[in-house]
Amino acid sequence: MTTHSTTGDGAEPGAAFWRFSLSVYGQEGVPDICLALQDAHGVDVNMLLYLLFRATGGVALDAGEIARLDAALAPWRDAVVRPLRGVRRALKAEALARIAADDDRLRQRIKSAELEAERLQQMALARLGAEMAGTAQAPGAARGAAWRAYGAHLGADLPEAALARLARAIGAARPDGAEA
């Protein structure tokens, strides 16, 4: 995910989630945390950001709700988002980078397509997730509950230190001063 976008103008149901994601992901250190969680634990960064978005609003989705969202999004993630990411990453490899050393346009077009695929996934998350009530909690408690439920869904013990850093980034990214 990058922080550059010309879409998500507020007309779509997931526009607030998209703006939240761009704002949080744009905070120093957040991309590294998210990519480390993705590579080490199989975290879907869009799902993680959605869970944090809902938690910031005081709602924690439970394990069953997370599983239903994940199952609904898996075909898109597996057939579109991950392959685009794989191609983009492959083009950074030295052997391939030498072929297009003077022209980075292909990689930039793929990066743009990947970002659009992630935006569409986020719109789907917002639509599907809106049907899920979750459990009302204080934002900090909701983040912790969602973090643990998502980790359990993945069969991973997600590091609490990463959650703490993400919570600080959410606080820094929110101009309205909402509780971090």
Image (cartoon, grey):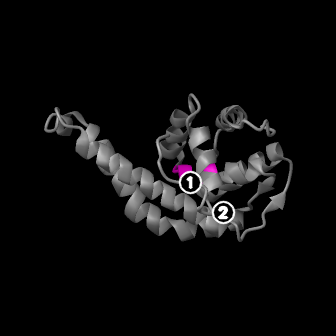
Q: Which residue is at 67% across, 53% downward? A: 51
Give whichever of 14, 86 is nearer the camera: 14
* Residue 40 is at least partly visible in this image: yes
> Residues under labels 1 and 2: Cα distance?
27 Å
Q: Quadrant of residue 155?
A: bottom right
Is disc 2 placed on a helix, strand or loop? helix
Q: What residue appears at the point 79 percent right and 56 percent down from the top-left corner?
A: 59
- Secondary element at image label 1: loop
Could one spot residue 67 in this view of the protein? no
Query: Is 144 placed left or right of 107 in the picture?
Result: right
Q: Which residue, given by chain and number where applicable, does mark 1 sit on?
A: 9
* Residue 42 numbered tag: none
The residue carrying pointer 1 sits among few (fewer than 14), some (14 to 19) or many (20 or more) residues within 10 Å by Cα, namely few
Residue 28 lies, with reference to residue 93, above or below; the image says: above
- Residue at 56% of width from left, 39% of height from top? 25
Q: The C terminus lies in which quarter of the figure?
A: top right
Residue 153 placement, left or right of 96: right
The residue under the point 16% across, 38% down is 100
Name the kind of residue labelled 1 in the image.
Asp
Left or right: where 63 falls relative to 89: right
Residue 141 on the magenta segment: no
Q: Residue furthest left?
A: 99
**Numbered disc in front, either 1 or 2:** 1
Upstream in the sequence, badge 1 or badge 2? 1
In the rendered image, residue 99, in percent from the top left (x then y), is placed at: 13, 38
Q: How many numbered markers are drawn?
A: 2
Q: Magenta region's main secondary structure?
A: helix
Quickly name the residue at label 2: 66
